[in-house]
Image (tube, rainbow, N blue to C red):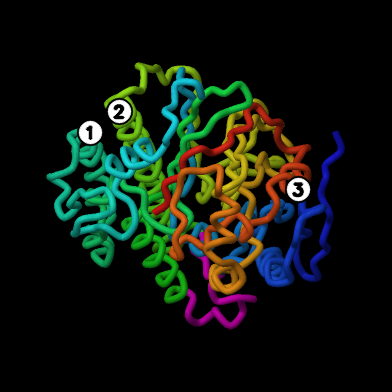
Amino acid sequence: MQPNYEVIEVENGVPIKAWVRGVPFDDGARAQLVNVARLPFVHKWVAAMPDVHWGIGATVGSVIPTVGAIIPAAVGVDIGCGMMAVQTSLTASDLPDSLKGLRAAIERAVPHGRTLGRKGRGGRDEGSWHDLPGRNVAAWTELEPGFRRIASKHPAVKNANHASHLGTLGTGNHFIEVCLDEAEQLWLLLHSGSRGVGNKIGTYFIELAKEDMRHALGNLPDKDLAYFPEGAEHFADYVEAVEWAQRFAMTNRALMMQAVVAALRELPGLPGFTTERMAVNCHHNYVAREHHYGQDVFLTRKGAVRAGAGELGIIPGSMGVQSYIVRGKGQPESFDSCSHGAGRQLSRTKAKELFTLADHAEATKHVECRKDKDVIDETPMAYKSIDHVMAAQSDLVEVVHTLRQVVCVKG
């Protein structure tokens, strides 16, 4: 199949290959992609996914291969943000008529929202990590030595919320969903990242890169594109820190999924079930060491999923539209990547201005979820059409399962 991208030539830079046919592509995102393409260490080209939209520093929905340098702001502050999905043996017929109890059980099982140190919507006090379930404590015991090494060299990050955030969802566009596939099989789906500690690490190293480059910032197209050259004082420290935060994020998703599964198993009226059929746990906001076009590179996927040949990934829609389990086609020109979701087409502020609670309720009427003013910015209309996004990347992935939400828990 022929690649489905458009080429944007960049003066004094590498090209941009953009999989954006049939989807909105705003000028702000285009300008950010051009800025990245002009950096001297970008390998071959920059790839833009169909969910591309403006971000801080680098565009969300961009894939950036670099040689000899890493841009902390391109990785961002939600380091290791990603998705996890588990297929269960339950079917639609196993679900109760009212899904309110199912939603409430998940909300009790997984702390969500800005609840650290106080009673959250789930009713749990997250003030001390010693109060968390044993599996969370065990997970932190494995992660803690790496964090201590990082904090010993960079004390500014040592007071980050870390262990107490393990197994917690967070806010914004993070969510947990119960979904049904095309065969009416029940899936559990969740979206979250490295929480407070990833934010602290990301913010700290972004500013450190700016400080290290303070005499050269004026030569950059955007000061948020400050980078660490390989071999520089803080390059190895950043690589260690970002890889640790990505492990934290992966662990965080696994712990939440365990908590959700346990909560459902205790729910009265729901039959026993297994979760051994299919599971996917993938980042979509991270940097990895990969090999592309004859070169070892640091590949930053800022809002993009690895989609190597045969690899499974997750592309969520929004609160009211379908999500997808996909299999990568290994398209080399996208650096084995695909979109990480539908992608915002409206800012959070604009969405709150344009849509009412009635609009949101109508768009999510088939989903047991929050329908209050604090989630208007996450309403489906704030996002691009997932149908158009999937059509634009038909050369990057094939659909394995189509999931429709029946329950959605938002942070």
Q: Which residues are magenta?
A: 213-229
Residue at 44% x, 31% y is 97
Sequence-wise, which precedes: disc 2 or disc 1?
1
Q: Amino acid at mark 3?
A: His
Pick the residue in front: 300 or 21: 21
Sequence-wise, which precedes: disc 2 or disc 3?
2
Q: Which residue is mark 3?
A: 388
Sequence-wise, which precedes: disc 3 or disc 1?
1
Q: Which residue is mark 2?
A: 267
- Mark 3 and mark 1 in contact? Answer it, CB < 8 Å: no
Q: Residues within 10 Å of mark 2 (few under 14, many from 20)?
A: few
Q: Is residue 298 visible?
A: no
Residue 381 sits in which quadrant? bottom right
- Name the front one of labels 2 and 3: 2
Which element type, helix, strand or loop, lies under badge 1?
helix
In magenta segment, residue 363? no
Which element type, helix, strand or loop, lies under badge 2?
loop
Q: Position of residue 87 (x, y in %)?
A: 49, 24
Q: CA distance from mark 2 to mark 1?
A: 20 Å
Q: CA distance from mark 3 to mark 1?
A: 41 Å
Q: Position of residue 85 (x, y in %)?
A: 48, 33
Q: Residues within 10 Å of mark 3 (few under 14, many from 20)?
A: some
Q: Amino acid at mark 1?
A: Arg
Q: CA distance from mark 2 to mark 3?
A: 38 Å
Relative horizontal placement of residue 297, taking residue 78 as reference (left or right):
right
Pick the residue in front: 353 or 156: 353
Of the numbered discs in the image, which one, if any, rests on residue 405? none
Q: Position of residue 384 (x, y in %)?
A: 68, 55
